[in-house]
Image (tube, rainbow, N blue to C red):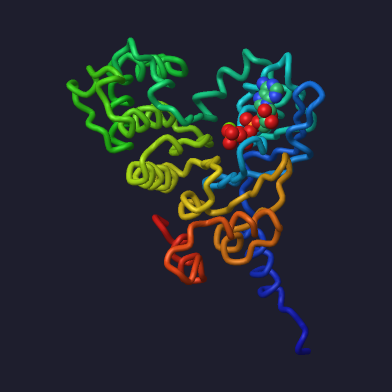
Amino acid sequence: MDSAISPRHAQIDIDMIASSQPDIFLSARVSVRYREKSVLSDIQLDIHRGEVLGLIGQSGSGKSTLAMAILGLLDRKQARADGSIQCDGCDLLKLREKDFRSWRGRKLALVLQSPLSSLNPALKIRTQLKEAWRAHASGPAAECERAIRSALESVSLPSTDEFLRKYPSQMSVGQAQRVLIAMAVLHRPALLIADEATSALDVITQSEILSLFRQLNRTTGMAILYISHDLASVAGICDRIAILHEGRIVELGTAAQVLANPQHEYTQRLMRALPKVPQQGFGKEQQRAAAATTR
Ligand SMILES: Nc1ncnc2c1ncn2[C@@H]1O[C@H](COP(=O)(O)OP(=O)(O)OP(=O)(O)O)[C@@H](O)[C@H]1O
Ligand SMILES: [Mg+2]
């Protein structure tokens, strides 16, 4: 009788299993080649609703190619993507460009590395935010103004007329990056892809912007695919980390698992390459601290 399970216990077990299943927003099973060159080989990556997933790999490993494949921005003449990218009941690889336009900026958003070159230097911030809002909404001017001010507040920028009258050149790089993030979150996307979004910033601004991404993830519930070559700086905001090496996902796990117990030889090399502070190196205490940063 010891092993007998009452129906009530069986139900609890089933409920526990069901609640531990992640809610998958996007499921990529994809290979990409540029002409004869294979860049992504049978990538299998799921992005869960509401998570921050770090995609870490060295330059040329294919990180941006995966982002572009998800966003339908691969050069259709040069690149060939095989497989599928399932998202909200659609295979993104099969979407036509005209249908993709209603996804980008609304369900899926992108923030890139160089904020000042991503903004139009000739247009005031208000104009650029208005254009981003009008790309997917058609309400009255007052509604647009409310959405703009609320997006600016969500990234801790002033929502004043004085700020909205500024041109990009009148802002710091950190402020410009916040404006781009405000633009990206205007329509409350379900997934934000940040491709090296903090690489051009000094370390203090970088850490502030990373905290902002984590805060937006918590307050809005949007998932973030955070792309970086720098495991140490982004690990603290990630729920899970995928390591991309030469076009393959070689390791995937919770941030704590990957940092504390890297399995793949490339991840182990990445860990060994981390700055050694203090002299004992990146020991268990530091790994715990890194994993806990800003969480
Ligand atoms: N349009 C293209 N045509 C041909 N090859 C390309 C094209 N875009 C990227 N590649 C090649 O694909 C490989 C992966 O590039 P990708 O930009 O995805 O790497 P990455 O991991 O984002 O690198 P980085 O960290 O430098 O941004 C590189 O070898 C690159 O030269
Ligand atoms: Mg890149």
Q: Give 197 or 237, whichever is nearer the viewer.
A: 197
Is 120 left or right of 22, judged from the image as shown?
A: left
Which quadrant of the rendered structure holds the C terminus? bottom left
The quadrant of the picture showing ligand 1 is top right
- Residue 265 lies, in percent from the top left, at 71, 58
> Which residue appears at 37% of the width and 45% of the height?
203
**Furthest-right residue in this view:** 36
Q: Is residue 90 visible?
A: no
- Residue 231 lies, in percent from the top left, at 54, 51
Is 175 left or right of 44, judged from the image as shown?
A: left
Is 87 left or right of 51, judged from the image as shown?
A: right
- Quadrant for residue 205, please give it: top left
**Furthest-front residue in this view:** 279
Which quadrant of the rendered structure holds the N terminus? bottom right
> Which residue appears at 51% of the width and 29% of the height?
109
Q: Give 248 or 23, whichever is nearer the viewer.
A: 248
**Furthest-top residue in this view:** 122
- Residue 166 lies, in percent from the top left, at 24, 19
- Quadrant for residue 94, please give it: top right
Compared to residue 15, the image places residue 96 above or below, namely above
> Which residue appears at 41% of the width and 45% of the height?
210
Give the total of numbered labels: 0
Q: Is residue 99 visible?
A: yes
- Residue 176 lies, in percent from the top left, at 34, 28
